[in-house]
Image (cartoon, coloured by chain):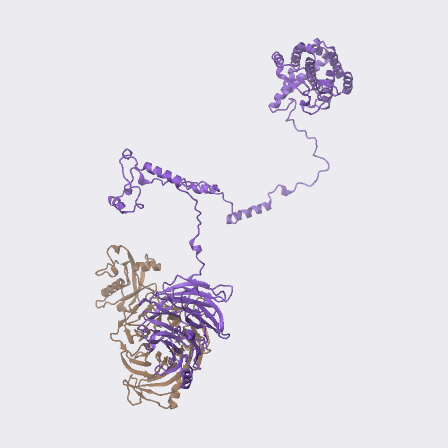
Amino acid sequence: MEFGLGSGGGGGGGGDESARRVQVRFTTKLGPPLRVPSASLAVPSNLTRMGLSEIVNLLLKNVNDEHKVQPFDFLIVGELVRLPLEDFLLAKGISAEKVLEIEYIKAIAPRKQPNPSLHDDWVSSVDGSNPSYILTGCYDGIARLWKGGAECTHKLAGHTGAITSAVIINGKDDSKHTFHIATGSKDRSLRLWKVLLSTNFDGIDYSEQPVNVRESKILQGHTASVQSVSSDPSGDMICSGSWDGTIKLWEVKNSDADGDSVSIKKRRLISNTANQVESQLEVEGVAVTTFVGHSQSVSSVIWPEHETIYSASWDHSIRQWDVETGKDTWNMASCKMCGKVLNCLDVGGESSALIAAGGSDPVLRVWDPRKPGSLAPVFQFSSHSSWITACKWHRKSWFHLLSASYDGKVMLWDLRTAWPLAIIDSHKDKVLCADWWKDDSIISGGADSKLLVCSGVSI
Amino acid sequence: MGKSQKSSKEVDELSKEISRDVTANGSTEGINEKDDRFQPSDLVDSLEDEGSPYDSGEDDQDASDYKSHSNAEESDSSEDEVQGSPYDSGEDDQDASDYKSLRSAEESDSSEDEVQGFSYDSGEDDQDASDYKSHRSAEESDSSEDEVPSRNTVGDVPLEWYKEEEHIGYDITGKKIKKRARKDRIESFLAGVDDAKNWRKIYDDYNDEEVELTKEEVKMIHRMLRGKTPHAGVDPYAPYVDWFEWEDKGHPLSNAPEPKRRFIPSKWEQKKVVRYIRAIRKGFLKFDKPKEEPHVYLLWGDDSTAAENKRHGLSYIPAPKPKLAGHEESYNPSVEFIPTQEEINSYQLMLEEDRPKFIPRRFESLRNVPAYENAIKETFDRCLDLYLCPRTRKKRINIDPESLKPKLPSLKDLRPYPSTCYLEYRGHTGPVKTISIDISGQWMASGSSDGTVRVWEIETSRCIKVWDVGEAVNHVTWNPLPELPILSISVGRDVLILDTRLANAENQARVKELLHVEESLLEEDEGNTTPVVRWVRDDKYDAIRLKHLKAVTTIDWHRKGDYFTTVVPSGHTRAILMHQLSKKHTHSPFQKLRGLPVTAVFHPTRSMFFISTKTHVWVYDLLKQKVVKKLETGLQEVSSISIHPGGDNVIVGSKEGKMCWFDMDLSSKPYKTLTSHHMKDITNVAFHRLYPLFASSSEDCTAYVFHGMVYSDLNQNPLIVPLKILRGHNSSKGRGVLDCKFHPRQPWLFTAGADSIIKLYCH
């Protein structure tokens, strides 16, 4: 079946070049309404992604008249097409003689939120692990809870220094109505907060409205500013990395019991305009254990599995710690493959084993610790132009991760192509943090004091 | 046969003898001369008759003929002899009798000795006979004719000795042999003309006689000339007679049968050959290839080099060859060689030297080509060139310019070093004059001429603290102790010791305690006649203010964080001051200073102190309180100094853009002076605490990063490699980069610019 491009032959499919054609067959894993007949077509070889997308849309329209035009992305042998088809085949060494199987997926086109949520100071940390709330940490020392990403419902004040890291602790055995928040700050302390979604404090069911955010604990022990906080998957413990080069593990749960049973003197009661944050000072928590090993600031910690903690440090190393023994089981410092200061770290991807990290250079690197012998990064993404401050794997997809950089951009990456899938450059200044939210949105905060939510990132 | 041969031989000899006799007679006795003339010819004739069959004596047939003939002769030999003998008519009886007696002697089987003896006895007076006899005896003893004993016995002496004598020598009996009367030429010629056998005569001047060669002798000579054996009878190819019998003889050396190995191919050789074949096939064994002669050679090659190779000393240098004519100089060149009119016009605009000498033109035929107008001039010029231009041989040394460069390691191996600017710290409104990095690497303090001091968070480039001190800040430094985040700021005449409140709670108390000034101490100080420095509490900034008499330029902390020094350049004897923070005490230990001080720094590990004046750097030992070393910089005006963390190396930057590296173990002169990298004043130089890096910043808006490796091995000199020029700052009022400092832990460089921006260069 010859396929002649009609109007607007996408990708500049010209007449004189149409002599060169490639036999293709479109396949997909998408649902039936978006499935095209599996006959092979001859398409001009100079088509780009846009041209292919137009063809697929035309085909879909032939099948179904009510089809709405939407962009698609195309995979050839597991690689996203980012070049003209001909160049792509040449670069990858794929024969153009055979019928080419092209898989199409929905293209990602992030929609930007028109009015970003403004903070009083730089946004240093965001957490989107709760589908209904976004937690942000700010340089004014206040952590904020944003309902639906738009409305600031709670301010968690208490830190005397800038908040560097804030996480929502989603415990598995937590009741539906409570969750914890942990914040780390430059005042060398961590604070634990308890959020009660619906309580019968007042006998009113607020239904998904957090009425009570209680500061449950102050965790002292670090001698320098806390750089990063991460929670155990079970939600029982948190770990924190600090500028003093140590990683400390803290209990979450028993403090609850303590805090509830042992009545602590109430020093002050701050009534907020938004809601009431009951400050219940001062339950001091002490670190359960301390992991010593990094020689410089631990900039990022991740606790993806119950028994392992990953940490990235300014001493150019990534370490994997065994929680039980407190020893680092895997150390990437020995070989100076990277040799750069590391700012962020995340573990995810294929069977949650790949390590992505970014640091004091514009390259986002992905390592595979299972690969024996070599410590060379398996992927390197270098479209940023400045330090990388945050990188996060998509919680469900093996291929997608995002990175934020001082150049003001948030980039969405797919492991199958070396080019970013999408670039979000709404920030006017450095982007300090970014995260996924609800699996289809990207939230990011930066030095322009904005929290940006980009939705429509359906993976 | 032997006998006949012998007889015929004897005949030869005889005839020879006779002829000799005849000549002898002829020569001695003039009377017989006429007869002599005939006799020899007769003799020869007879001889020829007799010897004719012998002539072709090589033939067996002839020999047999002769044999029979001679056999036949035997019977009537006497008659023959009588008949054929020339002596028939011989007058000399003596001769005849002699001859006869000889003959008879020969015929009979009597011994030769007897005959000899006989003839010998009788031959006293008769020379001829005796001659003959001696000859005979010699003949018998040896067949060689060369050994005929000569008449003369003088031996092998020069014959001139007898030139004047009348005799030519002595015969065997010792009697003189008289010289014969010489025939004059005409006579001898006439004699020769008449004598048909004259060509066979040879004068023997040793014996003073004329010898006539016999026909046999002539034949012999002929044969020898032809390369044959002298005697025809000798058969050179005679069948070989095996005189020894081999077979069936009783005792061979070995009786063993011939072994088998003699007639089967050798296995060992075969193995060897196989091995060689394998080696050749696999290429282990290679044959020398014959040298390939170049088939073509450069016909127009430069023969000057050939001459150069051959000659030595004052050698001939060939004249340069004139340029060969190309296609464009043809009378009818291709169109592409012909310049257009525009091009020809453009030639006029060119300089005389650049203008092309020849402009190609086209002609229909060779006839139309005009005479070359410059021919004579060019020939003359060429001659002039050849004559006047001195041609010298240029010794050109072919040196690869790359090889002259010092061997430097590649920049890849020297990583990490700062190369790219990723972060900028913006906020100051005036030129940032000074920066200082907190020892933990988390904070950076900066002082600007806009009168503010700012503290930045390095990681995020966030300004966390601002102090407005009201006056241009000259210098800021952190206390080197990480637990005491105290900042010292030099502002005009004052030095502020500032609490940054970045310490944690317990250290904060310590800082507060340190920064507390007792008023009583102040009064004590004031009690002195000339208070050097007044320690005053500054409530506004929660700090101590050290009031100096003159403007303070630099501050440097001792590594233990208690002492610090301030430099007051115009302070004369009190230019360098030492302060102790814990006791709030100041003293000026350097009363006598040679030169205007610029900066002063503490040694990073030992109790030493460096004071740099405008031209020298003085190294003091603080314990012994004396000068240890004086470093002669050779610079006009030193602007900055930095000590290697090892403590033995110092770099000094100067206002003329030069930088000196001193190895203090090596000498007090600079080990290396880096001259030409900065166009303008060097504002600061800095060593990295951990990495082998150092940097210099300059007013020309650049900062240079160098690799400066100091080896622990004392024999190895420091390695200095320029790494990177860091640009990015903009010039503001003629000033560029005002300060540069390394991050204490990372290979990062901070530069403070006059454009009020601080930049961080990362690796």
Residue sitting at the far front: B529
Q: How many marks?
A: 0
Q: Is residue B700 left or right of residue B139?
A: left
- Letter of the chain in brown: A
Q: Quarter-wise, where is residue A100 in the image? A: bottom left
Q: Is residue A431 visible?
A: yes
**Front-lying residue, B114 or B549:** B549
x%, y% of residue B518? 41, 85
Q: Position of residue B721 (x, y in %)?
A: 43, 63
| Residue B731 x/y as whole percent | 32, 66
Residue at 51% across, 64% down = B715
Image position of B365 with respect to B200: above or below: below
Q: Nearer the viewer, residue B253 or A3?
A: B253
- Viewer-side residue, B652 vs B52: B652
| Residue A42 vertical position relative to residue B381 in the rendered view, above or below | below
What color is chain B drawn in? purple
Quarter of the image with the N terminus of chain B in it: top right
Res. B31 image quadrant: top right
Left of A33 or right of it: where is B560? right
Residue B453 percent coordinates (x, y): 34, 76
Task: Please identify the quadrant where the C terminus of chain B is shown.
Answer: bottom left
Q: Is residue A286 among the parts visible in the rendering?
A: no
Vertical relation: B333 (above or below) B549: above
Image quarter of residue B521? bottom left
